[in-house]
Every structure is written in structure tokens, then in C-alpha cells.
Amino acid sequence: MNNLNRLFQFASNIGVQGPLYAIANARIHSPIPLEAVENWKFWNEPKSSWVESLARAYPPSSRRKAYLDSMLAQDHATGIESHYDISNDFYALFLDTKYKFYTCAEFFRDEETLEEAQENKAKYLLSLLNLNGNEKVLDLGCGWGAMLKYLQDTGHYGELTGFTLSKEQLTYTREKLGLNVSLTNFITAPFGNTPCDRILSIGALEHVRPQELKQLYEKIYNSLTPKGLAVHQFFSFERESYPASAILLQLFFPGSLLVIHRHHIEAAESVGFRITHDSIHDYKPTIKAWYERLVENQKKALELVGLEIYNRYMTFFPVAWLFFEQKEAELHRIVMEK
Ligand SMILES: C[S@@+](CC[C@H](N)C(=O)[O-])C[C@H]1O[C@@H](n2cnc3c(N)ncnc32)[C@H](O)[C@@H]1O
């Protein structure tokens, strides 16, 4: 994009999506790689109160809703493919090397590596799943197969199945890991003919739109065996439905809109689930670890995906960190009992 085009794009973004989005998009289209320290500071140093107020208030809520509704008109796969189907080798540059979890880890101590922290998280989720070893487990939005592989590695011998909407992930999980994964939209498609003992999702319910939630929980409930469990890790808005940050997030997850946490709980309870666990965890150390690894691997990343995608992730991580720092959203782990 030349300078004139960048200027037009910036002006148009200011008018439609507001200043936060316009600035982020301009930085993504920077003609040079974003510099690590300056870039992190740019998003995360305290701003004056009028800048904060403008960023939160513009565009006004009726305009935000109209824009988000137009983004939500696209089908799920388009947004998912644009985020996940970039290059498996690119993701491998910053995710943990053993499992490739692309979700919040659990750092108990600052010195822990990302690999240790992801195994801490997997162990935590395993304890919530309360397995004997022979249960049928379905992973909604299984990514690069991380949790399914962890279950295998820790001795699970019951049937394991995963759904994803990413073709790159499908190839990886089937060909590299030999897992039973299919390209299935868990929002619109049935889950199969035989009930599951456990239904799991890690970082996938973020892609479920508010109006789809109740139907999805109903399907999860009906697809579980009696006394079956659903275990979910996801982040959700704490307060407003259409904050300015929801517009900014369209740059990274087009067509996804977070649900307010209370609405998750109400939807799950309304179909019959009993919530037996709901804990909050800190996403920020994981995001910082991914950022640092991406910066360390800048040269390879640029070779693999080019400047724009590199700058997109360099922008995504500090924006996401700030999002959790300001407690716009919180990361929950939840157990729902049938
Ligand atoms: C953030 S990744 C998390 C992957 C994995 N659970 C992990 O912990 O690394 C989100 C995953 O949800 C999947 N996903 C999102 N919406 C989906 C849908 N409607 N149907 C199937 N998979 C979906 C994506 O393809 C991706 O695999």
C-alpha cells in the first residue's frame, strides 16, 4: 500500500470504525516491521484521560452495533480461515513447541517457560474433566490438536474427536498427529449419532455470536451422556455488549463478537446445566510470551508470511494484553454438569 492509499484508508477507518481501529490498521500497514519495544509501549503506556475517553466513546454505540452487525453477517469459516490459515510454520514460531496450544496458559511462577505453563493449563483442565480413561471426549475447536494429544499422552484410551474450521489445522492434526479431527462447524452442524461423556472447548466459544449461544448450549447438553460434563475455557466481556474494543478486534477476528459472561451462564443454566466450577485466570503472561517469541523469530516470520501479517500479530498481541489489563474481558474455566 503506498502512502496516499494509507492516508485514504486511515481517513475512511476514522469515520467508520473509529480512531483505535484506524491507528491499529495504519500500524499493521507500516512499510517497515514494527519495532518491538516501541510497539509494546505504544499500546501499553498510560494515555491521557481524553485519549482514553475518545477511544472508548467513538464511534458511538448505535454506529458500533451497525458495523458489528454487518461484520457478523459473514459466515463463520471466512473469519476463522483469515486468522488461522496463514501458515502452520508461522504459528510454530511463537506457540509452545510440544503441544501448540493457541490459548491461555497457566504461569504459576514468572520463571516458567511457555511449555511448562501450557502443560500446567492442560493438567488443570484434565482435573476438571474428571476422567477414568475410557470416556468419549469431543473437543470443539481443537486447534492443532493440543489437548487431544495431551489426553493421549496422559493415558486416555477412550474415543477422542476434534472439530475445527481451519484447513491448515485439519491437515496438521490428521497427518502429523494421526488424530480423528474433521472440518465441522460446531455451531451449525450436529455432533454425531452417539453421545459423548465429555465435551471440551478451549478458546473456541469466543467465536460464537451472542444469538447462537443458547442453541449451542442446548446441542452440547443434548449430545452428552447422562451425568456428562462440558468443560470450557474462554474469555468473555465483563460489561457492555458493543464496546469500542469489539470493533478493534474485527481486525484480528473478523465476524466474531464476544458474549457477556453472565449471558454464557444464563444460557447454559437455561438449558439445564449446573455450573460446578467457574475460575478466572490471567491471559497476559501467555500473550507476552507469544510476543517475545515472535520478536525473536522476526526474520523467519517475515520470510514465511510477509510484512503485513507480521505487523498484524505484532499489533494483535499488545492490543490483546491491554484488553485484559483493562479488564474488558476475563478468561474463565468452567465446568457444566448435565
Ligand atoms: C484459539 S483456537 C484454540 C485451539 C485449541 N483449542 C487450543 O487450545 O489451542 C480456536 C479454535 O476454534 C476453532 N473454531 C472456531 N469456531 C469454530 C466453529 N464454528 N466450528 C469449528 N471450529 C471452530 C478454530 O478453527 C480453532 O481451531
Image (cartoon, rainbow, N blue to C red):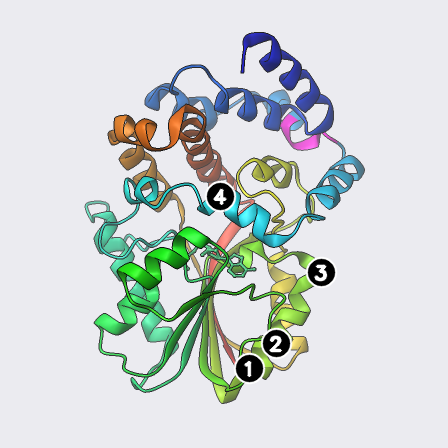
Q: Which quarter of the image is occupied by the C terminus? A: bottom right
Closest to the observer: 2 or 262?
Answer: 2
Location of mark 3 (residue): 211
Determine the residue located farthest toward the top in the rendered image. Answer: 4
**Image mark for residue 126:** none
**Residue type at the position of mark 3:** Gln
Secondary structure beneath label 1 = loop
Secondary structure beneath label 2 = helix
**Image mark for residue 83:** 4
**Image mark for residue 219:** 2
**Residue type at the position of mark 1:** Ser
Closest to the observer: 37 or 215?
Answer: 215
Magenta residues (range):
55-59
Give the quarter of the image for residue 267: bottom right
- Mark before the other along the chain sequence, 4 or 1: 4
Determine the residue located farthest toward the bottom in the rendered image. Answer: 226
Determine the residue located farthest toward the right in the rendered image. Answer: 62
Classed neighbour count for the residue bearing mark 4: other residues with Cα under 10 Å, few (<14), some (14–19), many (≥20): some
- Closest to the camera, between mark 1 and mark 3, is 1
- The residue located at (65%, 32%) in the rendering is 56
- Mark before the other along the chain sequence, 2 or 4: 4
**Residue type at the position of mark 2:** Lys
Measure how far apart labels 3 and 4 are at the Cα level: 22 Å
Q: Which quarter of the image is occupied by the N terminus? A: top right
- Mark before the other along the chain sequence, 1 or 3: 3
- The residue located at (62%, 70%) in the rendering is 216
**Image mark for residue 223:** 1
